[in-house]
Image: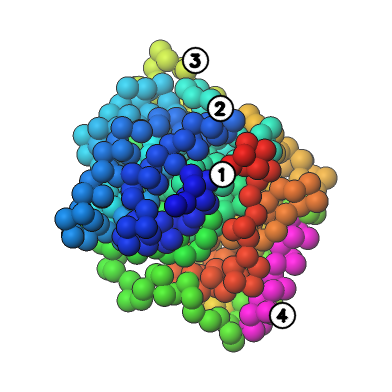
Amino acid sequence: MSTDNEICRMDAVTIASKVKSRELSATEVTEATLKRMDVLEPHIHAFCTPTPDVARAAAKAVDTKIAAGEDPGLLAGVPIGIKDLVATKGILTVMGSHLYRDFVPEEDDIVVERLKDAGAVIIGKTNVPEFGYSGVGHNPVFEATRNPWNLDLTSGGSSAGSAASVATGVAPFAIGSDGGGSIRIPSALSGLYGIKASMGRVPLYPGCRDERYPGVSSWESLEHVGPMSRTVADSALMLKVITGPDPRDRYSIPAADFDYVEAAGESIKGLKIAYSEDWGYAPVDPEVRRVVSEAVKVFETDLGCTVERVDPGWEDPLPHFWTMVASDTDLTGMRRLMKGREHEISPHLLDLVFRDWKAEEFTDAKFVRQGVCNKMWRLMANYDLLLTPTLAVPAFPLYMQGPEIIEGKMVRSAAWLAFTFICNLTGQPAASIPAGFTKDGLPVGLQIIGRHLADRTVLAASGAFERAKPWAHVWPKLVGDLGL
């Protein structure tokens, strides 16, 4: 019989297999997970709304199906955390804001419907910055989420709690969302694999699509939902469940013509790969440069690819990014909700919502986006993949929006995000994969970017790199210190 700790160190593929074969029951898995959550939560604050009763009921339903000889689904009994920006029917969904402190959605997001149908067990809602308008993990309502590798540092965001929960084995995977990097950012800072599939692969609704809820309805042209996990195979398995078109999302596209799980096992020998260390303009922490450059060499020395250094040739579009976010935001609705409650709102969000935006700023940003997209497809016409650092820095202290100095240069507080948001502008598939550790023991991510709709190639490269340089056996010291 497996111990609780053994169960919580299993990947999702293994758990689903053992539950289906009756080596484990979904109830055993759920109870082990909830015990681990109880031990870790005082340290990491990953879950803003734990749902033990919901989890136990879901696990019982899976076990009942199996006992009756019915198919329990691809994710039978696998525990999962759901980011608190993603709607869950009947479960509090606060989004890190006092404005929605008592909000209980009347319907599930599409991905939640699909996860439930596949037999996954929701163990709680994971913490986020207010409405996800940040790359870190603190908000005005709940305790700040902490990085399991160093509790004084951020786990990244906006999928902050999802990252901390998976990094400590509370669940083998979690749902994140990504409007400017919010799957890849916390994956990089927390030592995980996270993938933002091509725009439209994973349909969204009501998140980003429901005009009735200001704040919830934001980021429509930028947002993606996807998996964060300790292994590439687990993310591929989740993608197999949550992808495919849905009429509620006008951006959703036809189902892929490949199997996500099989793609992660394919060879990438012979691929031509571009590598940009800094886009030609971004300050990057020297330790990040070192770790990522060593990881990039693996594609040549171990995986049979050719790698060429490139600079894409666009000027830094970061000053226009938040303008694009503002243009996707219900400014009228947000201002109405915030009026008289300004003291309860995150200062950076107040600044964005109440700024006196001009039409020309929105149209300028739109054309900057078009320019980036055009330069990117021209670059990718010559390469199968593009590699970059995921982030310009390792994890930094809590309660900051970002470091003010990188590589000895004064920078904007969002400059550390130079690499991630580009693929939200273009809609390309992009993953962050653990590249290694700094001299201080902090995780560093390598970003793997594919051509338009080339999710299969990104997964193949991710799986190949993982086989060459595995990481899932390495756990944060906190886990061992707590006897887990």
Q: Residues within 10 Å of mark 1 (few under 14, many from 20)?
A: many
Tell which tag, 2 or 3, sits nearer the viewer. Answer: 2
Furthest residue toward front: 1
Separation of disc 2 and disc 1 at Cα? 13 Å
* Span colored in magenta: 288-306
Mark 4 or mark 2, which has the lower sequence index? 2
Vertical comparison of 126 with 22: above or below: above
Secondary structure of the residue carrying tag 1 is loop
The type of residue carrying mark 4 is: Thr
The residue at which mark 3 appears reads as: 343
Secondary structure of the residue carrying tag 2 is helix
Estimate the x, y position of residue 80 in percent, counting from the top left: 40, 46
Q: Quadrant of the C terminus?
A: top right
Secondary structure of the residue carrying tag 3 is helix
Mark 2 or mark 1, which has the lower sequence index? 2
Q: Residue at x 69, y 70 (%)?
A: 296
The residue at which mark 4 appears reads as: 301
Q: Please tell me the numbered disc located at residue 42.
A: 2
Q: Main secondary structure of the magenta part?
A: helix
Mark 1 or mark 3, which has the lower sequence index? 1
Asked if the stretch drawn in magenta spans residue 344, the answer is: no
Q: Residue at x 49, y 24 (%)?
A: 142
Instruction: Please indicate, yes or no, whether residue 346 appears anywhere in the rendered image.
Output: no
Secondary structure of the residue carrying tag 4 is helix
